[in-house]
């Protein structure tokens, strides 16, 4: 707890004008020390006492200076999350203002990863497209904030044209060395991979273990087999699904969605996945609500185009220690109620990527039934029968 006392003493010695001039920097530093203190305390009552007493004190001081403070609890939790980001040199972290240091480190790591990847792209036009369009969002930034190993880097693109050209580049690379025929098409106003007969194409050394809905949560990563041959080229295409292309060395190209980060996040469901890095302008966005969700391991639903998928996805978070309240489920149910799940296209789209091995079988059964019977319509009796048989 000494580091917290040092922080309090340093801030108390500052004049009001100095504090006002540097208010954001100084309060970030202070809340960071609170986070560091929380790391060292195992007693839950002790943690609550620190948070509550500090929140009351600094709410008053900020208001006295003429500032409208954010929710103190949010700020404390935010900085506690930053404190968990794997920085061993705590004193250095304190002195340099936590969130700024962590943000710089994340940007540095992401930039290095992308630059390493681009070394293995042998088409100058594609390199230019990548440099101008790469957006990374989702679970990898969550892992970096928590000081955990990144399973994969989910790459999105600013434009449909960029998405299509990059997808075509890697489809050609894959087709040149494999028997599968991967085609990239602009269909239904989005870019999709089509693989003859199987629906997926993968390198023989690639282990499939993922959701393919294009929504990243870092709980079901596209996993490489530990036996992958290191003699093969880095960042080669190893897996294609309708919605994504996986490269070796932890790069995943999501082609289901594209656009600005704001547009991409309209397809996301939980707020913790909305941290974002845009390579073209070196900007890292860490929304406070997302950081609060991460430190609390609490799912907060922000709305999605795929609420059925979201409901099912919650199982995976819960199994990893996350919590969710009834209100979040109610929000998802309200959105599900707006869908026409009797329409096969809607039904199929909502289930895309969720436990794909099982739901793909269910969808295949319905597609076969529709081919055999032109009057076929989805009804609960038939669906229950199919689900019971497959699950």
Image (cartoon, rainbow, N blue to C red):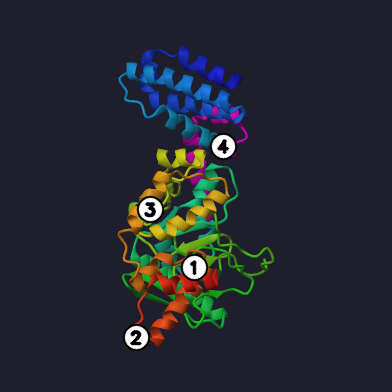
Q: Residue at x 30, y 20 (%)?
A: 66
Q: Alpha-carbon distance for marks 4 and 2?
A: 57 Å
Q: Is residue 347 visible?
A: yes
Q: Is residue 260 above or below residue 123?
A: above
What secondary structure predominates along the stretch shown in magenta? helix
Residue identified by numbered label 1: 245
How busy is the neighbourhood of tag 2: few (under 14 within 10 Å), some, or many (20 plus)?
few
How busy is the neighbourhood of tag 4: few (under 14 within 10 Å), some, or many (20 plus)?
some
Q: Looking at this view, is 25 or 352 the one in front?
A: 352
Q: Looking at the rendering, which quadrant does residue 17 occupy? A: top left
The quarter of the picture where the N terminus appears is: top right
Q: Alpha-carbon distance for marks 1 and 3?
A: 28 Å
Q: Alpha-carbon distance for marks 4 and 3?
A: 30 Å
Q: Alpha-carbon distance for marks 1 and 2?
A: 34 Å
Q: Residue at x 34, y 62 (%)?
A: 159
Residue identified by numbered label 3: 332
């Amino acid at each position: 707890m000494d580091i917290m006392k040092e922080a309090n003493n340093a801030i108390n010695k500052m004049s009001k004008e100095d504090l006002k001039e540097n208010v954001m920097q100084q309060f970030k530093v202070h809340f960071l020390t609170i986070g560091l203190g929380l790391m060292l305390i195992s007693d839950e009552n002790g943690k609550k006492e620190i948070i509550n007493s500090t929140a009351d004190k600094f709410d008053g001081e900020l208001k006295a200076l003429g500032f409208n403070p954010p929710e103190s609890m949010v700020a404390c939790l935010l900085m506690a999350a930053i404190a968990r980001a794997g920085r061993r040199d705590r004193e250095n972290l304190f002195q340099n203002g936590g969130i700024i240091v962590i943000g710089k480190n994340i940007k540095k790591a992401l930039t290095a990863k992308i630059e390493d990847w681009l070394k293995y792209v042998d088409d100058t036009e594609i390199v230019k497209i990548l440099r101008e369009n790469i957006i990374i969002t989702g679970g990898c930034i969550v892992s970096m904030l928590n000081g955990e190993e990144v399973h994969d880097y989910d790459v999105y693109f600013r434009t449909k044209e960029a998405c299509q050209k990059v997808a075509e580049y890697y489809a050609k690379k894959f087709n040149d060395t494999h028997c599968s025929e991967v085609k990239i098409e602009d269909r239904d106003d989005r870019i999709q991979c089509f693989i003859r007969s199987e629906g997926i194409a993968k390198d023989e050394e690639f282990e499939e273990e993922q959701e393919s809905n294009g929504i990243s949560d870092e709980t079901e990563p596209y996993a490489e087999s530990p036996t992958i041959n290191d003699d093969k080229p880095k960042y080669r295409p190893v897996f294609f699904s309708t919605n994504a292309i996986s490269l070796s060395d932890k790069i995943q190209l999501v082609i289901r969605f594209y656009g600005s980060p704001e547009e991409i996040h309209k397809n996301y469901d939980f707020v913790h996945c909305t941290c974002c890095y845009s390579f073209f302008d070196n900007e890292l966005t860490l929304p406070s609500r997302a950081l609060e969700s991460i430190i609390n391991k609490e799912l907060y639903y922000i709305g999605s185009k795929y609420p059925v998928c979201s409901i099912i996805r919650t199982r995976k978070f819960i199994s990893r220690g996350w919590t969710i309240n009834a209100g979040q489920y109610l929000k998802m149910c309200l959105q599900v109620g707006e869908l026409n799940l009797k329409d096969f296209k809607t039904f199929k789209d909502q289930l895309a990527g969720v436990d794909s091995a099982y739901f793909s079988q269910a969808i295949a059964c319905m597609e076969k039934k529709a081919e055999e019977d032109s009057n076929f319509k989805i009804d609960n009796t038939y669906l229950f029968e199919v689900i019971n048989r497959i699950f």
